[in-house]
Image (cartoon, rainbow, N blue to C red):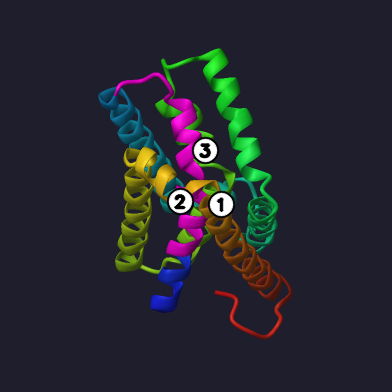
Amino acid sequence: MDDMSELVNGFVTLMVTMDPPGMVPVFLALTVGMTRDERRSVAIRGALISFVLLVVFALIGTQILDALGISMSAFRIAGGVLLFWIGWEMVFEKRLERKEKTTETAITRDHIANLAAFPLAMPLLAGPGAISATILLGSRADGLLETVALVGIILLASLIVLGAMLTAGFIDRLLGETGRNILTRILGMMLTALAVQFVIDGMQAAFGLSGTAG
């Protein structure tokens, strides 16, 4: 990471892929019929599991790619395309529909038993988009200080998502369906722009083009 703007971009990317406003109706559907204490327990465990998963990928994601023979340039391009697709889903209201289908499947199969781990922690919070973004950010972290800063960003994003889940009922009433749709579309547009930048960086690094490859 070159400067503060990289950290800000990383935080925005994580926030958009983890999607706190989009998680509100999904979390409410997942925990329907639960008491307040049960809902709080699921939210805390889910946020904790997703935080650990993302930190692991941030720290050793590059080594995993190296072991598989995948270059960072290739992963940046692939990750950018994936993030662009997620952003497209958010803009055109497809992502919430997919999450709701995942929620229905999980409730049918496992009901409440492992709700915090699946589908809440993965794939709803630490999904392919968030994991890809985390590996990309981890590859840019240079030295202990920037790595600690990245872990801090993941922690902050996880805490914000946790706060959204703990106050899901209030946020749902405050935003309403229209407010959630507008906010999700705005976040989706931001994610598509960041995704395009990931692809540009990957192509610059892969083909030795001029510019900042990160």
What's the distance in space between the residues labelled 1 and 2, CA to CA?
7 Å
Q: Residues within 10 Å of mark 1 (few under 14, many from 20)?
A: few
| Quarter in which the C terminus is drawn | bottom right
Secondary structure that dominates the magenta span: helix
Is residue 62 visible to us here?
no
Q: Is residue 96 visible?
A: yes
Mark with earlier residue (3, 1): 3
Report which residue position mark 3 lands on.
Answer: 124
Q: Residue at x 58, y 23 (%)?
A: 104
- In the image shown, does 41 or 143 lie closer to the viewer? 41
Identify whether 212 is placed above or below 32.
Answer: below
Q: Vertically, is 5 above or below 176?
A: below
- Disc marking residue 178: 1
User: Furthest residue to the right?
Assistant: 207
Determine whether label 1 and label 2 are within 8 Å by CB.
yes
What residue is rendered at 55% in x and 21% in y?
Answer: 106
* Residue 37 locus on image (x, y percent): 25, 25
